[in-house]
């Protein structure tokens, strides 16, 4: 296990006004108000794993279960769908020459504008599905680029939402390049969850979408958590979680630990380098939704300030965490969590085996730990291979996302 306490000079410094405005309480409220327009929208459950907490020696373990978010099986449904809504509102206001309210999204005038638009993104699976769902709801055409390592099940789920799916040789980063180039050539609107110099507005909106999930947690808890283990790919989720918690709780904010696959730990590497860096492409990880090799510019700006530690987990750690969630001890509730969804749990389990790491993070019997199970069995075949069980619950979770 590799753990690095945040030693960056920016750690603890305030967020920029633009970044803060994208993750504060007002931002989360805007997301929730817009998502109420989606028939499938409802808060996801927050479970307390008391037996596991007792075994590990902490006071509480909370798990936010995103396996049914908007019927799409992943927290990513928040960011992509919200971003498409915002894109349509902005374009409608330009075309109609007047303010357009969310209540008008399904009006004939706004839908006529939406039909002229094409949104595009690259994806490991879940973000593209979210963009496709938002596009279908509003009548927008969607072109989704998937790289060669995206499973057939995830590709089929995107296509089932009416999106045009284009496959790209290579990895996620190469699909991002292709999506950006094709969008520039055809006048499409890129709805990416990662950002780079000159492209920040929409990724910031995607990250804002995730704050709705964190806001639900804050309302459900009687006291703030003391520690949060949150997984990261390009860093958008980690930025939303750490940023929103810092805005809500201020000096009482929890310690946030970013968890990445050992084979794709670009935030960890950026911390070690003292700046945002790209890392070499390595062997693919089973945590496919986290397989990213360069942090998002916007996310890194937030993460470097409000995340307290960075750690890496192995493939075996992820599988163990999936099984722990699927087959809990005592009376704890089973949770179906995919390989990437269980990464936060993988981080906690690994840390609790290392006494020096526990002490470095201040984890003890008074700690209240928050985890996010960010996806369900979005690839049911892979899930069953890793967990090795065919219970009714697993099969039901698989059917829910097919």
Image: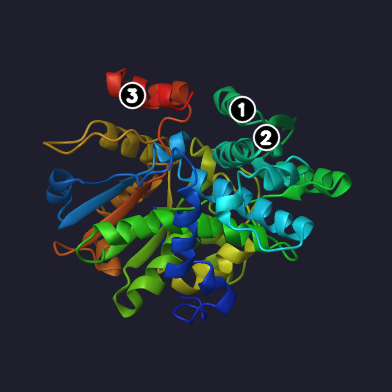
| SS class, disc 1 | helix
* Alpha carbon distance from label 3 to label 1: 20 Å
Give the crowd class for mark 2: few <14, some 14-19, many >=20 residues within 10 Å. many
- Residue in the foreground of this view, choosing between 125 and 309: 125
* Alpha carbon distance from label 3 to label 2: 26 Å
Marks 3 & 1, CB-CB < 8 Å contact: no
**Which disc number belongs to residue 394?**
3
Q: Is residue 158 left or right of residue 378?
A: right
For disc 2, the marked residue is: 146
Which residue is depicted at the point 33% across and 59% down? 228
Which residue is depicted at the point 20% across and 35% down? 328
Is 354 drawn above or below residue 70 in the view shown?
Answer: below
* Alpha carbon distance from label 1 to label 2: 7 Å
- Residue in the foreground of this view, choosing between 9 and 150: 150
Position of residue 281 measured from the top left corner of the image (x, y, whole percent): 65, 45
For disc 1, the marked residue is: 155
Q: Is residue 167 left or right of residue 149?
A: right
């Amino acid at each position: 296990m590799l753990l690095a306490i945040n030693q960056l000079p920016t750690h603890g410094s305030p967020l920029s006004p633009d970044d803060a405005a994208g993750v504060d309480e007002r931002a989360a409220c805007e997301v929730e108000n817009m998502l109420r327009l989606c028939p499938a929208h409802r808060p996801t459950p927050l479970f307390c794993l008391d037996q596991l907490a007792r075994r590990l020696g902490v006071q509480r373990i909370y798990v936010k279960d995103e396996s049914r978010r908007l019927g799409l099986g992943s927290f990513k449904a928040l960011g992509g769908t919200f971003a498409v809504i915002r894109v349509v509102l902005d374009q409608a206001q330009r075309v109609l020459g007047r303010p357009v309210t969310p209540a008008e999204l399904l009006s004939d005038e706004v839908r006529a504008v939406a039909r002229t638009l094409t949104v595009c993104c690259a994806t490991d699976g879940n973000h593209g599905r979210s963009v496709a769902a938002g596009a279908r709801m509003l009548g927008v055409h969607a072109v989704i680029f998937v790289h060669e390592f995206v499973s057939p099940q995830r590709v089929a789920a995107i296509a089932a939402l009416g999106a045009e799916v284009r496959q790209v040789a290579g990895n996620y980063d190469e699909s991002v390049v292709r999506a950006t180039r094709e969008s520039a050539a055809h006048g499409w609107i890129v709805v990416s969850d990662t950002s780079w110099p000159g492209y920040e507005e929409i990724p910031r909106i995607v990250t804002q979408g995730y704050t709705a999930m964190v806001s639900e947690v804050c309302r459900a808890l009687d006291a703030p958590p003391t520690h949060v283990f949150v997984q990261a790919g390009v860093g958008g989720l980690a930025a939303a979680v750490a940023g929103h918690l810092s805005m809500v709780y201020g000096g009482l904010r929890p310690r946030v630990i970013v968890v990445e696959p050992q084979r794709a730990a670009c935030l960890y590497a950026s911390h070690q380098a003292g700046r945002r860096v790209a890392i070499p492409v390595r062997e693919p990880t089973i945590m496919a939704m986290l397989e990213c090799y360069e942090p998002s510019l916007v996310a890194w700006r937030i993460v470097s300030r409000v995340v307290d530690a960075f750690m890496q987990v192995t493939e075996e750690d992820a599988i163990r965490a999936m099984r722990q969630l699927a087959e809990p001890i005592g009376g704890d509730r089973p949770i179906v969590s995919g390989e990437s969804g269980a990464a936060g749990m993988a981080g906690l389990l690994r840390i609790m085996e290392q006494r020096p790491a526990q002490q470095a993070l201040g984890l003890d019997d008074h700690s209240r730990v928050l985890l996010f199970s960010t996806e369900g069995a979005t690839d049911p075949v892979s899930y069953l291979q890793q967990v090795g069980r065919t219970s009714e619950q697993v099969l039901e979770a698989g059917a829910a996302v097919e």
